[in-house]
Each structure stands twice: as structure tokens, then as C-alpha cells.
Amino acid sequence: MFNLEEMSKLYEENIKEPTKDEAIDILSKEDLSDVDFIKLLNCDDLDVLEMAAREARRITEAYFGKNIFLYIPLYISNYCSSGCIYCGYSCLNKIERRRLSLDEVEEEMRAIKKKGFNSILLLTGEDDTKEGFEYLKSALKIAKRFFPEILIETGPLTFEGYRELVEEGLVGVTLYQETYDLNTYEAVHLIGRKRDFYRRLNAIEEAIRSGVREINIGCLLGLSTDFKRDVFLTIMHGKYLLKKYPKIELSISFPRIRPFEGMNFCYTKVDDLQFVKFIVYTRLLLKNIGINISTREGKELRDNLIGLGVTKMSAESRTGVGGYARDNPSPKQFEISDDRTVDEILLSIKSKGYNAEFTNWVMI
């Protein structure tokens, strides 16, 4: 089990900002220690960041080449059993609830396949009902006809639940802890099974033990006022998983909170400089993991991060239920920032001297 208390203590003991010379000395190391990583997280010197960015580019190209893997999310349902005050799908919000019919699921997948994608990420609200699980399994069976790589982003399941889905073709699971700060976690999750912090923390290992090969974890930047601590603990959680389960393919995401219609939640703003730091310094510490960036971020920032650590990007995302086969006015989980088409993103990646890939060759 990931030792949250020990890692939290390590962070608190080493939170002091390093001098510029000390930070440069850290960058000269072949391998960074956990304490080195804490110090870099607390260093805002732009010269240091520029040096680190060059090294992050070198490492990324050495391990992944000049390739960016594109993925697409498909929200199939917005039913939710949890009350998370930062989410448009919260059960506390009075919105229209909808599940795509299975015919609509197939229609959406055909539309996505025509765009060139060979993998799909299926998303739902945190629906803890048996009906919700059986619906997810039915959607996964349809996805298996179109995509060799199927991933889900839902509420945590049991070992048996994940195992059932693996037998149907599930390859990957995205499960964000949201925040690793217990007090903040309790304050923003008001009702539902998601209030159980440790159930969520440990569920990712249930997925791995069930046979899931691709794992994506992350923290929602802005929930906790101490977002650097959240980043550190996310990365330490990832290191723990890699050490215990060396055969998994691990990815890290750093989503920033985005607004939704009717949002009434004050969150901590995480600026672009901090965001770039997190990606660059994560690459220096964990050289061979995937780093995702979604359409929550604007197109200029996403384009500028190509080559600086990012290996996976979402494209042409819809954050309401469906929306690829036909326009869908359903409520959105959050507003996106990069609304470019797949073709526009492909051109942008190519202009940077990189290749856009629709097949995850690491997985295959």
C-alpha cells in the first residue's frame, strides 16, 4: 500500500526553496532523488527551468522518439452517485441525466473511428449502481469491435469488477485521486462512495491485479491550496506503482480545474509557469512514463509543450454525453480550452517536427 504519511512527511521536511546554484547542481545529476524533485518543485527560477526543459526534451526523444500519441474521450453517461463540488456531473447538480443507448454508443464509436483513432477512452459519472456497471460492460463490448485499445475513466471498481471488464477487452484505467490532502478531499466530496479516500487510493492496485496494463493517475490542480504537494504525492504514488508492478505502462496527468455551467466553487489558480514546471521536472525524475495533456489546456500552451515531456494529447474532445456523431446539447462535465479539430491538431504537431500517432505502439 502506498505510504501517504511517509511521503507527506518527506515533502514537509524538504520544502525549502533551493538556491539557483543548488538547483543547477541537481540538474547535472543523471538520476534525481525524491528530495531533488521536491526542491525543483519549489524553484521558480526561469534560467533553471529553461535548462531543465532542454534536458526534458532530450530524455523524451530518447525514450519516445518524436511521437505524440493522440487519444479521444467518449462520455457515454452522466449519471453520478457522488457529490463533488468541483464537477459538472455531481449528483448535487440539477442537470439532465442521460445514458447513450447502445445503438447511439455504436454510432458515436463509428464516428470516432472515421477520425482515425485506434483507441478510445470511455467515461461516465461516478455511477456506483449495478445498472451502471452492466451498461459500461455492454459499451465496452461494442468498443471491442472497433478499437484494439479500450480504456475507462469511471468511479473505482472492485477487483472482480475490473476483472470482468478485462475479460471483455479492457486495457487501461484512468483514475485520479483528485487531491492527496485528506482535509481538502473531505471538504470537496460531500456525499457518495467517493468520500472514501482510501478506497479510491487503493482501487488502482485492484485494477492492476485484475490484469489492467495501462494506468493513468493524477491530481486535479487547484483543489488543494498546496498544489505542489499534490504533484509530489502523485509522482511518488506513480513511483510506488512502477516499483511494485514493473510491467504496467504508467502515465501521469496534471489536469487543471475548468469551469462548468452553474459552478459555485472557489479554487486555487495554478498558472502556466507552475504547470510547465510540473511536466518538465516530472520528466527528469520519471524518464519512461507517459505524460498526458488534455483539451482542458489552451492550444498555444499545448503546442509549446510538444517535445518538453508530453507524450499523449487528447484531440477534438467533447465533455458532454456523445457529441461526435451528431450535435448533443447535454450538460458538459467542464468547458474545454482547445476546440481544434483533429486535422488542425495533426497539422500543428507536424509543424513542430513531430509525428502524430493513433496507435499506442508501447501497448502493442
Image (cartoon, grey):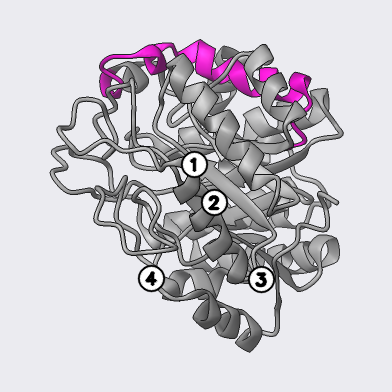
Q: Is residue 195 visible?
A: yes
Which of these two is toward me, 108 or 200? Answer: 108
Q: Determine which residue is flagged by label 1.
A: 102
Q: Quadrant of the N terminus?
A: top right
Q: Determine which residue is flagged by label 2.
A: 106
Foreground mark, 4 or 2?
2
Label 1: few (<14), some (14–19) or many (≥20) C-alpha neighbours in 10 Å? some
Q: Determine which residue is flagged by label 3.
A: 307
Side of 29 where 348 appears, left or right: left
Foreground mark, 4 or 1?
1
Q: Determine which residue is flagged by label 4.
A: 339
Q: Which mark is residue 254?
A: none
**51 lies above or below 95:** below
Q: Quadrant of the rendered structure where residue 72 is?
A: bottom right
Magenta span main SS:
helix
Q: Looking at the image, tell me whether mark 1 or mark 3 is earlier in sequence order.
A: 1
Q: Looking at the image, tell me whether mark 3 or mark 2 is earlier in sequence order.
A: 2
